[in-house]
Amino acid sequence: MKVTEHIAQAKDTLISFEILPPLKGKSIESIYDHLDPLMEFKPAFINVTYHRSEHMFKKKADGSFEKVEIRKRPGTVGICAAIMNHYTIDAVPHLICGGFSREETENALIDLNFLGIDNVLVLRGDAPKNETFFEPDPHGHSYAIELLDQVAHMNNGVYLEDDLQSGVKTNFCIGVAGYPEKHFEAPNMQTDLTHLKRKVENGADYIVTQMFFDNQKFFDFVKKCREMGITVPIIPGLKPLTSRKQMTMLPRIFHVDIPTDLSSEILKCKTDKDVELVGTEWLIAQSKELKAFGVPVLHYYTLGKPKVVRQAVEAIM
């Protein structure tokens, strides 16, 4: 089923989870071990992130260095198919611009369509690790809206080859990212919302937000979206805060604020175990308030912390 169909049929707020692909060399069992403790909550769908390749410098026999491209985690197609087969649950693969040509993207979409995977989340993606700026593939997309357009075109039977007649129409439900605290590259919130509205006008079916720790920022974001005429479902993305280093890492990498009440409590903690307790209680309070607000789905970024997410979901069920 499509994400939007899950939402339309739901009688209460749904639960969904997001996971990382395992590092190359690990088995699919690592995914199952991660998800098994969460499956009793009957999530509507599971998102699988995509991480672009990284550039590294390897020393050659002559002493010089060669820049090589290394992909540390496998792609989403096989993992999503395995999850759907193993759990009989919908999986949502992330598609990104960085590191992929339009041709590679089309082939991935064809594979997803053959596998009966009805949902995709389209993202520009980040700059490669240790690089400052995002650089698109020479034959790829520079912006998420271009990637969205490619998926939307395939939904209309339009493929990259101009002479391809009567192409099969795919039927993807397309999700896009939203930023309650604005995308860090946007000059202001209004510009960021204008770009988001264009994505919806071009075929986006729903929005999943970047993580946030202040619910009021989400409430304000939803209000501004609705005032602009964005009517598609808006799903809040939630992440547990579990270590002191996240106090500086998350604002630096993801450009999100840590509320004063939360940071004050974390600064009192002596160990990361103490931080995890504080973070869990904060996540539970966030979840309860968002559920009371009437969000369609609570989407949890599990990212190696299924135990904390499990505690939060147990508290609101």
Image (cartoon, rainbow, N blue to C red):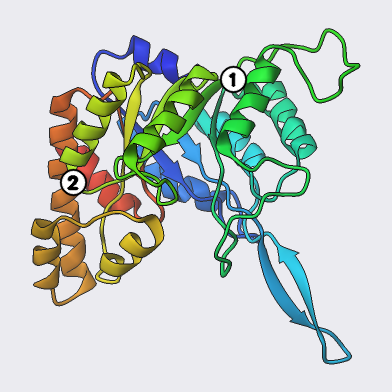
* Residue 74 horizontal/vertical position (percent): 65, 51
* Residue 30 horizontal/vertical position (percent): 52, 53
Seen in the picture, residue 299 relative to 32 is either above or below; the reply is: above
Please give the residue where the numbered disc 1 appears in the rendered image. Answer: 172
* Crowd tier of the residue under label 1, counting other residues whose Cα lies within 10 Å: few below 14, some 14–19, many 20 or above: many
State the residue in front, 134 or 45.
Answer: 134
> Which amino acid, mark 2?
Asp
* Residue 287 horizontal/vertical position (percent): 19, 38
Q: Secondary structure at mark 2?
A: loop
Seen in the picture, residue 310 relative to 110 is either above or below; the reply is: below
Q: Is residue 20 left or right of residue 208?
A: right
Callouts 2 and 1 close, C-beta under 8 Å? no
Q: Is residue 165 left or right of residue 231?
A: right
Q: Is residue 92 left or right of residue 222?
A: right
Q: Is residue 224 left or right of residue 267?
A: right
Residue sitting at x 30%, y 49%: 239
Residue that extends furthest to the top in the rendered view of this protein = 166
* Crowd tier of the residue under label 2, counting other residues whose Cα lies within 10 Å: few below 14, some 14–19, many 20 or above: some
State the residue in front, 20 or 317.
Answer: 20
* Residue 200 horizontal/vertical position (percent): 47, 21
Residue that extends furthest to the bottom in the rendered view of this protein = 63
Residue that extends furthest to the right in the rendered view of this protein = 163
Please give the residue where the numbered disc 2 appears in the rendered image. Answer: 214
The quadrant where residue 14 appears = top left
> Which amino acid, mark 1?
Phe
Report, in whole angstroms, how far the alpha carbon at label 2 lies from the one at label 1: 32 Å
Q: Would residue 317 be visible to someone looking at this image?
A: no
